[in-house]
Image (tube, helix red, strand yellow):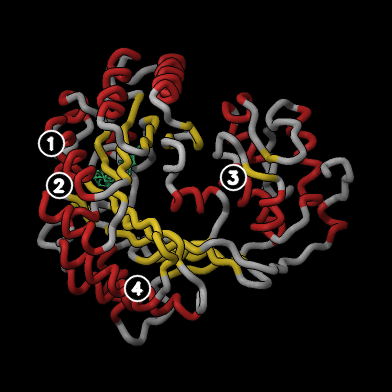
Amino acid sequence: MIENIVPMQRLKQAINFHSLPPLSLYIHVPWCVRKCPYCDFNSHEKKQDIPEARYLAALRRDLEDTLPLVWGRSVYTVFIGGGTPSLLSGEAIEQMLAMVRSYLPLVPNAEITMEANPGTAEATRFAQYAAAGVNRFSLGVQSFDDDALQQLGRIHNARQAEKAIELAMNAVSQVNIDLMYALPGQTVAKARADVQRALDFGTQHLSLYHLTMEPNTVFAKFPPKGLPDEDSAADIQDMLIQATQDAGFEHYEISAYGRPGCRARHNLNYWEFGDYIGIGPGAHGKLSFQDKIIRRANVKNPQTWMDRALDADSTGRIMHEQTLTVADLPFEFMLNALRLVHGVPATLFEERTSLSLLAVAPTIREAVERGLLEPDPMTIRPTERGQAFLNDLQAMFLPKEKASPV
Ligand SMILES: C[S@@+](CC[C@H](N)C(=O)[O-])C[C@H]1O[C@@H](n2cnc3c(N)ncnc32)[C@H](O)[C@@H]1O
Ligand code: SF4
């Protein structure tokens, strides 16, 4: 399949879909109790009570603006992310999901995930969220070490995190725990203790993130002391991969580990280059049509987003829209798909971009020769070396004028 090399320019391809990818819905809740010093998400310290009614009204307008683009399509997963969605009342989540259902058909057993901060976990509210339709919680635990939690500026301690996990597991059947590693002063032994405490709960999913210094955060300006060097962080990561595997988890994406059958379906749809609507401030969307693929991004500031969404004359001004070019698609696809440890079937490229695999055959062959992709014509799968040099591998698929030397 990869042997017949036809240069991209000569293929003269145009987007022409015969069927569209699965559709997901992301809903952004932008408020937090306090801004964590490492976080560059679109999250804002709440200075007063959250204006729930206004926020929900703006979400409705935002979704109504998008509906004409997705008529007739069913939604396969919903993700309520943040920020801290668990700051919203049970009634607010109930109204939010009722509104979603009134506009969009959800597939039977659609995965509906909600992120929660253990510092805001409360039994009655977790039960209300579940009654409203949430069937998966993702908890931002970060660590079970109280000193580390304090250094990370978290609003909860380890005991509260454990309580939140129990509450979540009582309320729904799918729970994810977020942990960060390569924390200041963290050794392999400390990281092992952290992951073991998470594993002991028996949740279905773990997300293990390497703590990164993101630009424009407090940590970027004032880096914490005692951050592990690259080798120590790699040792921690090797340990995490082994410990989770021993406990029966599959490592299926850079940071994602799931028990068999318990992968995060919503995130998987992003990584498999599926479609998604994004509503709420700063939310992003990607939508395929018969002859084009568009990306959309909402304005980030919560107040501006609400004002504009609710202002009858400002239609269109809450978001920026861009149509992807044929030349953009290989990189856009690979940016996501190559994050998956086991890669994707080679046929998915054509399914999700509508372009022939021949368009990327020369680049795939070069990546195989450089030991970055497996020489398997049936799958597009990074080798261990490809995973270690993922940025370089992804950059090989950039449109030629945008590519930088790798
Ligand atoms: C939107 S937050 C999750 C929910 C909630 N806001 C919380 O923190 O409890 C998503 C996750 O991203 C991870 N994260 C955020 N900033 C990070 C950074 N700079 N480095 C690594 N992981 C980060 C954290 O594990 C966090 O739980
Ligand atoms: S609670 Fe979560 S979203 Fe909010 S600032 Fe902290 S890490 Fe970011």
Label placed on residue 337: 3
Name above or below for residue 14 compared with residue 155.
below
Q: Position of residue 9 (x, y in %)?
A: 83, 56
Nearer-the-camera pick, 270 or 113: 113
Name above or below for residue 16 compared with residue 220.
below
| Label 1, ligand 1: CB separation under 8 Å | no
Are the residues flagged by discs 3 and 1 in contact, CB closer than 8 Å? no
Q: Amino acid at mark 4?
A: Arg
Q: Which residue is mark 2?
A: 121
Nearer-the-camera pick, 249 or 303: 249
Are the residues flagged by discs 2 and 1 in contact, CB closer than 8 Å? yes
Q: Residue at x 21, y 50 (%)?
A: 171
Nearer-the-camera pick, 396 or 256: 256
Please indicate whether residue 394 sits to the left or right of residue 106 in the image: right
Q: Amino acid at mark 2?
A: Ala
Q: Which residue is mark 1?
A: 160
